Image (cartoon, rainbow, N blue to C red):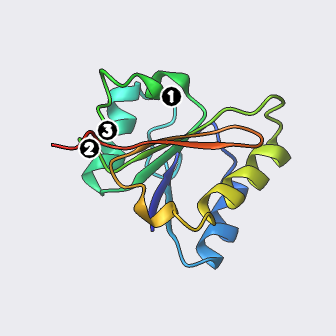
Amino acid sequence: MRIKLDENLSTLSVAPLRGCGHDVDTVMSEGLAGAPDDRVFAGAQSDRRLLVTCDLDFSDLRRFVPGAHAGIVLLRLAEPSRAALEARVAEVLAHREAETWEGCLVVATDDRIRVVRPADG
């Protein structure tokens, strides 16, 4: 799976995800740290990467319409420490259905994964 980690996620997640066979890039390595959401989103989309973020702005379904992008995974943890985020990122992306999340908004909390799929056309 092609993944882009937003700047609010530790770069320590890169190696374990690559070890699982994912093609991982980061906002930091692309020089987009501090860039507006539109630029971060465009960077992920130009490479057709699933954007993994903690930024609640990416949950706006009017702005980021399911089916019109490569997919967004939004992490919403009660206590988002670095260690908790790293563990949850690995767990979520190892989910058996993760390969089907292209075009979806995926909201992952501490104990749930909710997938908003594109509307049937």
Few, some or many C-alpha atoms within 10 Å of disc 3 (few <14, some 14-19, many ≥20)?
Answer: many
Q: Mark 2 points at which residue?
A: 67
In the displayed structure, 9 sits above or below 64; it is: below
Residue 49 appears left or right of 98: left
Counting residues from the start of the chain, the first of labels 3 and 1 encountered is 1
- Residue for point 29% across, 32% down: 65
Disc marking residue 66? 3
In this orientation, which residue lies closer to the viewer: 9 or 33? 9
Estimate the x, y position of residue 111 in percent, counting from the top left. Answer: 76, 43
Report the label total.
Answer: 3
Estimate the x, y position of residue 15 in percent, counting from the top left. Answer: 67, 69
Few, some or many C-alpha atoms within 10 Å of disc 2 (few <14, some 14-19, many ≥20)?
Answer: some
Tell me the element at label 2.
loop
Estimate the x, y position of residue 118 in percent, counting from the top left. Answer: 30, 42
Disc marking residue 24? none
Counting residues from the start of the chain, the first of labels 2 and 1 encountered is 1
Estimate the x, y position of residue 72 in percent, counting from the top left. Answer: 44, 43
- Residue for point 32% across, 48% down: 103
Q: Hey, what amino acid is under mark 3?
A: Pro
Q: How far apart are marks 2 and 3 (CA)?
A: 4 Å
Tell me the element at label 1.
loop
Q: Which residue lies furthest to the left in this view?
A: 121
Q: Nearer the viewer, mark 3 or mark 1?
A: 3
Disc marking residue 34? 1
Q: Do labels 2 and 3 touch, CB within 8 Å?
A: yes
In this orientation, which residue lies closer to the viewer: 101 or 81? 101
In the displayed structure, 24 sits above or below 116; it is: below
Residue 81 appears left or right of 90: right
Q: Which residue lies furthest to the front in this view?
A: 120
Q: How far apart are marks 3 and 1 (CA)?
A: 25 Å
Tell me the element at label 3.
loop
Question: In the picture, residue 121 is in which quadrant?
Answer: top left
